Image: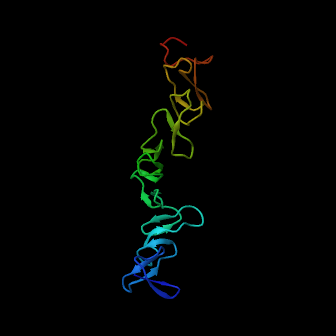
Amino acid sequence: RIDRLDNKLTCVLECPAGQFLDSATGVCAGCDESCARCSGAAADDCIACKAPAFGSPALHSGRCLNECPVGFYLDPSSTCQPCAESCESCSGPKTSDCLSCKAELPFLLLGVCTAGCPPGTATAEGSASCEQCHASCKTCSRPGSNTDCTSCDETNPGKKFLLRTADSAKCMPQCSKGYFSALAPSGYQ
């Protein structure tokens, strides 16, 4: 292989970084400016990327990008790899590495895409991430709030009755004055 250094021909065993062997001429030729190593002169012939001014280089289908496209994550070798099938975006290859989900399984629970949130969890407004209900609720319509319970844990004597008012639904240790338990035998108030 011949390398053109300072307009002089020099014989080398392999082309230096940033160059490739042009098989037509037998001479080392320059890679695209984004490539640290390449197999040809085109922008999509990169094998490794130069470090950008900020962030990490991302090699995807032979091209050097500032970040991986949606549906791919950056592996330790700075190459974009596909996410698991259920993930819209992810941090790794496993089904438990999802950051956002595709429409078929739209809810995210601890990094896993699901068809719905399991009991004891709900989504916050504008979010698709399943989050824990308030500790006083068995199930809820909004996570983290003790005023949005949809059911209570009947085995918890401290919070077993659901009190619904016009603007809230709370789990209480007993029914408030003027209310009665729907679980009470008929005739009791």
Question: Looking at the image, which is closer to me, 40 or 140?
Answer: 40
Rendered residue at 53%/86% (across/down): 6
Residue sitting farthest toward the left: 23
Question: Looking at the image, which is closer to me, 32 or 178?
Answer: 32
**Number of numbered discs overlaid on the protein picture:** 0
Question: Looking at the image, which is closer to me, 188 or 35?
Answer: 35
Up/down of 95 relative to 153, above or below: below
Image quadrant where residue 56 sits: bottom right
Counting from the top left corner in percent of width and height, residue 73 is at: 46, 56
Rendered residue at 46%/65% (across/down): 59
Counting from the top left corner in percent of width and height, residue 95 is at: 41, 47
Looking at the rendering, in which quadrant would you find the N terminus?
A: bottom left
Asked if residue 122 can be seen in this view, the reply is yes
Looking at the rendering, in which quadrant would you find the C terminus?
A: top right
Asked if residue 102 can be seen in this view, the reply is no
Counting from the top left corner in percent of width and height, residue 90 is at: 47, 52
In the image, is 54 to the left or to the right of 13?
right
Counting from the top left corner in percent of width and height, residue 163 is at: 58, 24
